[in-house]
């Protein structure tokens, strides 16, 4: 079918204007009017932010590309910031992170995932029984915490089912702060003690499913009750009830707790083992005599002489080497 009339020179012939299109530019809008938001949860692409006192739902702007937005991020938000139902804002910028807790699915997976941003403390929650404690998983979480620059806090639950002493002896040389609780409902003194360790800090909670992590978070922030699950009597494993990370403000004191989904593995493919030594300031000076690329578990490692000379506790060197070896182990070990 002809697009034009009989005479192609008639006035109804459409011609494309030239030289009038907007020139392309790589300049991005500054969004100087954007307000600061704090990401409290991310669910299927929808990001819930706290903007001032308002809870705002937002989407990541296209201009951010593949840059991830995770719980704990400080972001710049534009658009409808009223927080009213069915409104949607845009996240146009993710501010520089002070820390990033990362993990991979396993040690063979090169794709790292940021679990939480801008936390300064990692609470590792493990049960003393039902399910049985997994020291290797604790070690892996410790390595990830040290690598991210987070202070570790060890929380041992269900002490009425098994004593805490044997497990604590393994970690006392690391100087890790710890809390021991029972399986029963957390009493006011226990909750107050834990809350004091979390005050004025942003603390991410991690742990195997079924260890009581979310139960403790519910006791700390009773206004926001999250679903909890039971341990499977056959497998000894917990059932995933927390499916997305959620940041909650501590009532009555400055600070945030971030409840994360239960983990069955904590891959460390992304971590350079040479950075783990920074978590041992009493041992680090002794590495000056180590050969290049020393793995600190070799016959000519200078740390052996450093400890033998009385500069550090031998238990600390053992702990360092155990954590370094964790990088090479699989979760089931």
Image (spheres, rainbow, N blue to C red):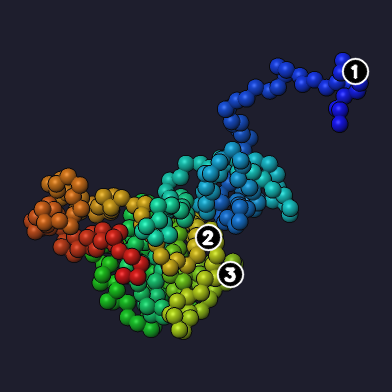
Mark 3 neighbour class, 10 Å CA radius: few under 14, some 14 to 19, many 20 or more: few
The answer to the question of whether label 2 and label 3 lie on touching residues, with beta carbons closer than 8 A, is no
Q: Which residue is mark 1?
A: 7
Residue at screen point 52% across, 71% down: 240
Q: CA distance from mark 1 to mark 2?
A: 68 Å
Residue 225 marker: 3
User: Above or below — where is 31 with respect to 128?
Assistant: above
Q: CA distance from mark 3 to mark 1?
A: 76 Å
20 or 115: nearer the viewer: 20
The quarter of the image holding the C terminus is bottom left
Q: Which residue is mark 2?
A: 245
User: Above or below — where is 272 with respect to 138?
Assistant: above
**Which structural element holds mark 3?**
loop
328 or 315: nearer the viewer: 328
Mark 2 neighbour class, 10 Å CA radius: few under 14, some 14 to 19, many 20 or more: many
Tell which tag, 1 or 2, sits nearer the viewer.
1
**Residue 191 x/y as whole percent:** 46, 70
**Residue 239 x/y as whole percent:** 51, 74
Question: On the rendered structure, is 287 left or right of 308?
Answer: right
Which quadrant of the structure image shows residue 108?
A: bottom left
Spot the residue most to the right. 6
**Residue 88 x/y as whole percent:** 69, 48
- Can I make out residue 34 in this image? yes
**Which structural element holds mark 2?**
loop
The quarter of the image holding the N terminus is top right
- Can I make out residue 253 in this image? no
The answer to the question of whether label 1 and label 2 lie on touching residues, with beta carbons closer than 8 A, is no
Tell which tag, 3 or 1, sits nearer the viewer.
1
**Residue 211 x/y as whole percent:** 44, 74
Question: On the rendered structure, is 145 left or right of 78?
Answer: left
Residue 87 marker: none
**Which structural element holds mark 1?**
loop
């Amino acid at each position: 079918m002809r697009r034009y009339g009989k005479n192609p020179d008639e006035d109804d012939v459409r011609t494309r204007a030239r030289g009038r299109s907007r020139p392309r530019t790589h300049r991005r809008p500054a969004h100087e009017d954007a307000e600061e938001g704090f990401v409290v949860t991310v669910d299927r692409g929808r990001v819930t932010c706290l903007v001032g006192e308002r809870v705002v739902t937002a989407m990541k702007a296209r201009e951010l590309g593949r840059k991830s937005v995770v719980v704990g991020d400080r972001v710049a938000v534009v658009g409808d910031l009223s927080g009213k139902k069915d409104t949607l804002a845009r996240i146009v910028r993710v501010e520089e992170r002070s820390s990033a807790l990362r993990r991979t699915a396993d040690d063979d997976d090169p794709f790292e995932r940021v679990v939480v941003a801008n936390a300064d403390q990692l609470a590792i929650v493990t049960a003393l029984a039902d399910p049985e404690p997994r020291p290797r998983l604790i070690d892996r979480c410790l390595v990830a915490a040290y690598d991210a620059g987070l202070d570790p806090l060890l929380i041992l639950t269900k002490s009425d089912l098994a004593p805490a002493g044997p497990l604590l002896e393994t970690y006392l040389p690391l100087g890790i702060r710890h809390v021991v609780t029972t399986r029963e409902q957390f009493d006011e003194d226990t909750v107050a003690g834990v809350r004091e360790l979390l005050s004025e800090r942003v603390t991410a909670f991690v742990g195997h499913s079924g260890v009581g992590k979310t139960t403790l978070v519910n006791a700390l922030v009773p206004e926001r009750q999250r679903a909890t699950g039971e341990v499977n009597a056959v497998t000894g494993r917990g059932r995933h009830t927390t499916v997305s990370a959620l940041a909650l403000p501590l009532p009555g004191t400055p600070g945030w707790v971030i409840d994360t989904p239960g983990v069955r593995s904590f891959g460390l493919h992304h971590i350079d083992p040479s950075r783990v030594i920074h978590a041992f300031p009493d041992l680090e000076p002794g590495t000056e005599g180590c050969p290049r690329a020393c793995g600190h578990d070799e016959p000519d490692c200078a740390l052996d002489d450093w400890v033998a000379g009385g500069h550090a506790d031998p238990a600390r060197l053992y702990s360092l080497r155990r954590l370094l070896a964790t990088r090479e182990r699989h979760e089931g070990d």
